[in-house]
Image (spheres, rainbow, N blue to C red):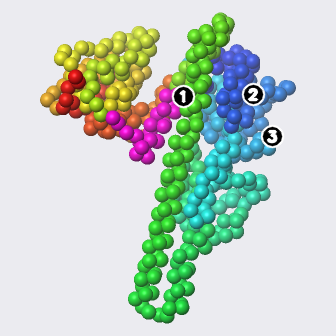
Amino acid sequence: MRALASLEGTISALKEKDALALSTRMKAMVIADPEIARAFVLENDGKIAGAFPTSTGSIGSFFGEYEALGDIVSEGKPYISGVYSNPGGRDVFLIYVPVLDKGNKTIGSIVFEHGTKQISDWLGNIRLSYGGQMMVFDFTGKVAAYPGKLEASESRLYEGLKPVQDALNGSLHTIRYRDPLIGEQMIATFVPLSVGSKLWVIASEQPVKTAYKSINAVKINIGLAGAVLTIINFALVAGLAKMSSRVKKLHAELSQKKDDFIGFVSHQLKAPIAALKWTLEMIISGDYGEIPKKMEAPIKEMQTVVDQNSRLVSDILNASRIDRGVIEVELKSTSLKSVAERAVRDYRIPAQKKGIRLILEESGPEIIVSADAEKFAEAVSNAVSNAIKHTNNGSITVSLRSDGDFGYIDVKDTGEGMDNDTIGKLFTRDKILGGSAKADRSAGLGLYIANQFMALQQGSIKVSSEIGKGSSFTYRIPLAKVKIA
């Protein structure tokens, strides 16, 4: 969505107030994602410049929820609102993305009304032990998703709930409380989760009567058996151990469900993106006939957006697999030169278009390493991609070398360089893009994934850099004990 807002076609259409072009772009987004109820392009004063679905008289009218965005509009930052009911009676939340011109000035915005049904359906399919269930609350404390249909009057029962408010203040806690809708005592865990610049809350709860069933049974047996001190002590210790085990299990289930949710959503996005990418390639290659001249630029822009989102989803999937420990490497004797050639293959044209030289230096005698060629090349290509983004003139040099134990690939550029604070965050999951982030930048996971890939192959990455003089990434990996036949 942010990539769409930064496209030249979107910016030009908004400046020229081309309602047809803007509405067409919004239509493409709504068709691509059925959970988007409505999509709008707004001018800075809140007037609708383009929309889908489009109704009579909507273009030029005032967007009703614009005032609710408040100071967010003037800050010029992406924003996710709380949940509310749109005119069609559908529970939605707003996703606001500013449109910036080349001078980084806000000239309008793109707003999507995104439904909550998909999250609710997902919660409905989760089966927690002991009759438990999960809920999601937005940053205002309102129920955003519930397993099953929840009427407005029922949803209001949860507003102002103290454990939810505590979680919105950053507290992860497990407590006993009375569920205002079910009317039962529950033991529940409330987990704060960052969504955009706000905190939302995921809650997992189960009835106390089932959670403490074993302990109640122990108490009854103690009363019937008499006051034998050793039996009482044993029963209390056993009961407390079971209670502690179940609380830990509840925490573990919630953490696992969160990871599964991220993996599931990313995997579900992969298929439609791949289908859209394939269709666009067929259109561009002429399989559906000659493309009208005026459609060439919009189609190529759309292809750029799809490619960017494809890489983003791939990064999220890889990070999710690494976190869950389900990603594997297949180590084989591999030519270091073939890995380097594979890493630079897709970046020669982007480097040429930017006017910088991409050089792969010969290494002399062939160097054979023990590696998973695909994952090693993907790790190295991340450094090449970043070098192109941060080098405006000069060159990028990829060189190979070895010592007695390891093979090395060095990626050196003459770009803008980095300070020590940025270098310290390169291989973490923290976003390091800052205010200079553009649409062609990823979610900041690339080098985190590259570092994990190298570690799985008993390798490593070392970085050195100087502001204004460029950066150097060195990939080290063990030499193969057996040469390639």
**Label drawn at residue 309:** 1
The residue tagged 2 is: 52
Could you say which quadrant of the image residue 425 lies in?
Answer: top left
Main SS class of the magenta portion in the image = helix
| Whether residue 200 is visible | yes
Taking the spot 15% from the left edge, 27% from the top edge, the residue there is 403
**Mark 2 packing: few (<14 Cα in 10 Å), some, or many (20+)?**
many
Task: Look at label 1 and name its amino acid.
Answer: Asn
For marks 2 and 1 on the same chain, the one whose residue lies earlier in the sequence: 2
Viewer-side residue, 109 vs 236: 236
Whether residue 316 is in magenta: the answer is yes
Residue at disc 1, secondary structure: helix
In magenta, the rendered stretch is: 310-330
Q: Which residue is mark 3?
A: 88
Q: CA distance from mark 2 to mark 1?
A: 22 Å
**Can you see residue 7?**
no
Answer with mark 3 or mark 1, whichever residue precedes in sequence. 3
Farthest left residue?
404
> Could you tell me residue 335's position as x and y percent?
26, 22
Identify whether 350 is placed above or below 110: above
Assign the C terminus to one quadrant of the image. top left
